[in-house]
Image (tube, rainbow, N blue to C red):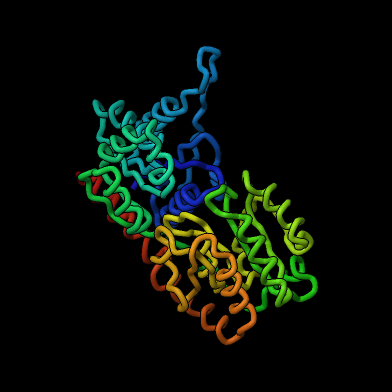
Amino acid sequence: MRIGITCYPTYGGSGIVATELGLELANRGHEVHFITYANPIRLDATIPRIHYHEVEVSNYPLFQYPPYCLALASRMAEVAEDYNLDLLHVHYAIPHSIAAMLARQMTQAKRRLPFITTLHGTDITLVGMDPSYFGITKFSIEQSDGITAISDNLRNHTLEVFGVKNEIRVIHNFVNCETYAPDPERRGLSRFAPDGEKLLIHLSNFRPVKRVQDCVRILAEARQHTNVRLLMVGDGPERGAAEHLAAQLGVRKYVEFVGKQDNVERLIRLAHVLLMPSEMESFGLAALEAMACGVPALGTRVGGVPELITDGQDGFLEAVGDVSAQAARVLQMLTDEPLHARLSAAARKTAVDHFSTENLIPQYERCYREVIGG
């Protein structure tokens, strides 16, 4: 199949999933065309059957805001005609599904160009709930030829809030279990834990919803009982506040902020526990990537996280904002070696058995064939 993919190319779960999906589809013999305003962060355009088409937006003095949606729709239609695409797959509803709908209309005289919208979370729970975007979000979902959501929780929330009649198919996020694999020796750990300490890790875009400062608080509490450090991977609006809090709590020298990173699997497999104290996660891709590396995760009982982490079996779940309980679970995992080994093995097994690319990419392929077939 010839597939056009549009996503936000910046750091964030939706862009990462879309990029990894495209790479996996190309490996399975499909021709994949990324249509975005910048090269997605994990995309290697030198891979066979992967193509990148930049969306250029003219910034005329008349426009207070550049009309990206219109430029994207034009580029989608152009690429679809030039490369004879079978369908478009857009990630994150606004504005991508509207642009795809326009591209479908622009090309309908010459060809059928269906599109699939994948809902990732904040496009529904935050952006879509804004009164300014509610109507257009609902319309874009209803106009899609196919809809997928990354968790049962997100699917149910979408149906409840927007009242759409469309079928929404749940296809969970996935992980390449060959790329994301354990390193029992944790080679390279000494770079971040020079004195043999245990290592916690957090990965996100550092938005308020990720509760980045809770990671620092967890470290501060855990360090009262054991030697441990924290690796903070990513960047965003909460980074400065987290750095300031670490200094206030006297743990600044035990926290390393490394910013945005490619090849995060090399960092994840060094850690002993992943922290994901978010107040909302529609799935929890970072936790899945950690689990595939044999790193158990501490998550919160929100959104789709319980669909990934089974409390006490392959990780732990605690209430949002309950730092004391979260720190106690982290300490338990760091100091009880048999428990950590059991959780680590179970986490890896969960990733391989239920969320591997081998299990989930065929679900997207079936969805594509159904939509292409009308």
Give residue 155's position: percent from left, percent from top: 31, 53
347 horizontally vs 118: left or right: right
Identify whether 345 is placed above or below 263: below
| Front residue of this view, candidates 261 and 296 | 296
- Residue at 61% across, 69% down: 269
Identify whether 292 is placed above or below 120: below
Q: Residue furthest top?
A: 62
- Residue at 75% across, 70% down: 193
Residue 46 visible in the displayed image: no
Identify whether 238 is placed above or below 85: below
Q: Residue furthest bottom?
A: 338
| Front residue of this view, candidates 312 and 357 | 312
Give the quadrant of residue 39: top right
| Front residue of this view, candidates 272 and 357 | 272
96 horizontally vs 163: left or right: right
| Front residue of this view, candidates 129 and 305 | 129
Give residue 69's position: percent from left, percent from top: 42, 28
Total tally of numbered discs in the picture: 0
- Residue at 43% across, 43% down: 126
Quadrant including the C terminus: top left
Give residue 238's position: percent from left, percent from top: 63, 47
Residue 21 visible in the displayed image: yes
Give residue 33's position: percent from left, percent from top: 43, 42
- Residue at 47% across, 59% down: 284
Identify whether 352 is placed above or below 36: below
